[in-house]
Image (cartoon, rainbow, N blue to C red):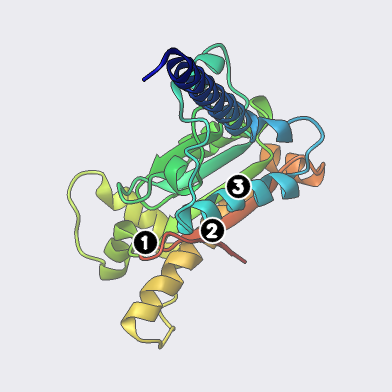
């Protein structure tokens, strides 16, 4: 190979290398921008956003989860550092303690997004109500959701009515008023309907809180019930 050919080959190699570096740099820049957008997405709803808009954003996260398009929003280590000094969760949730219902995951949310209170049967005890009053009146949540789910063990125990050890009976007692013994539907439909009745019952208990009721009346808070389908991962609102 003569000297001229070698020089041309060297020049082509340098150009290719430079192009590759530039392409990689652009990819990293795009990735960083995407990550930044992911981190701040939910926070952009702060300020004048209405409870309806916040609920819409929350349900959009579940839609991403159900369609396998989760973005793991606000789950990065960087986000953890951003919220270490304080929290302003836009949503408070009373959910069941069932391990099959990881609330942040099914709504595609992360650190600082949701103020979650959980117990077996998603029941609104005085302690839970107090915690949710804190999440809304003090921390500023604009949506308060009672989230029940398919095949809830606490509701099943209430339907069976068998003696239970320890303090478990107190959970069942809180669910009993949701049972309509006059319902003649088949057992599986009756089970699901009772789960949804229990969701409505707990929503009623939350609405009976003067503090929460005042926030609703002022248009600062929306209290809703929702049902999580274990089979397909979908969350649907319960009227």
Residue at numbered disc 3: 58
- Whether residue 208 can be seen here: no
Q: Is residue 180 above or below residue 158?
A: below
| Crowd around label 3: few <14 · some 14–19 · many ≥20 (10 Å) | many
Which numbered disc, 2 or 3, marks the residue closer to the eye?
3
Q: Secondary structure at mark 3?
A: helix
First in sequence: mark 1 vs mark 3: 3
> How much space separates mark 2 and mark 1, taking CA atoms?
13 Å
Q: Are marks 2 and 3 in contact (CB under 8 Å)?
A: no
For residue 165, side relative to residue 147 (left or right): left
**Residue 177 falls in image quadrant:** bottom left
**Residue located at (74% from left, 50% from top):** 52
Q: Residues within 10 Å of mark 2 (few under 14, many from 20)?
A: many
Residue 76 in the image: x percent, y percent?
46, 26
Q: Nearer the viewer, mark 2 or mark 1?
A: 1
Q: Residue at horizontal 58%, vertical 33%?
A: 38
Query: Which numbered tag is attached to residue 209?
Result: none
The residue labelled by disc 1 is 230
Q: Residue at x 49, y 53 (%)?
A: 147
Q: Can you give x and y, in whole percent of width and height, for residue 125 in the image?
A: 46, 43
**Is residue 187 left or right of 81 when viewed as pictured?**
left
Q: Earlier in the sequence, mark 2 or mark 3?
A: 3
What secondary structure is found at the residue carrying circle 2? strand
Mark 2 lies on residue: 226
**Residue drawn 46% across the image and 40% down it:** 104
Tell me, yes or no, if residue 9 can be seen here. yes
Q: Total of numbered circles in the picture?
A: 3
């Amino acid at each position: 190979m003569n000297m001229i050919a070698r020089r041309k080959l060297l020049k082509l190699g340098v150009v290719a290398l430079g192009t590759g570096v530039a392409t990689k740099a652009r990819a990293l820049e795009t990735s960083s921008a995407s990550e930044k957008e992911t981190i701040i997405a939910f926070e952009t709803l702060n300020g004048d956003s209405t409870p309806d808009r916040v609920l819409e954003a929350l349900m959009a996260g579940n839609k991403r989860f159900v369609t396998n398009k989760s973005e793991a929003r606000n789950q990065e280590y960087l986000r953890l550092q951003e919220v270490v000094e304080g929290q302003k969760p836009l949503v408070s949730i009373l959910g069941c303690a069932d391990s099959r219902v990881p609330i942040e995951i099914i709504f595609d949310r992360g650190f600082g997004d949701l103020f979650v209170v959980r117990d077996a049967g998603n029941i609104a005890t005085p302690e839970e109500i107090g915690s949710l009053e804190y999440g809304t009146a003090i921390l500023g949540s604009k949506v308060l959701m009672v989230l029940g789910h398919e095949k809830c063990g606490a509701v099943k125990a209430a339907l069976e009515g068998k003696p239970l050890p320890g303090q478990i009976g107190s959970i069942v007692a809180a669910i009993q008023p949701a049972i309509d013994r006059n319902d003649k539907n088949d057992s599986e439909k009756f089970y699901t309907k009772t789960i949804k009745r229990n969701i409505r019952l707990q929503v009623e208990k939350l609405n009976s809180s003067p503090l929460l009721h005042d926030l609703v009346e002022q248009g600062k808070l929306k209290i809703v019930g929702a049902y999580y389908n274990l089979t397909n991962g979908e969350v649907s609102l319960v009227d």
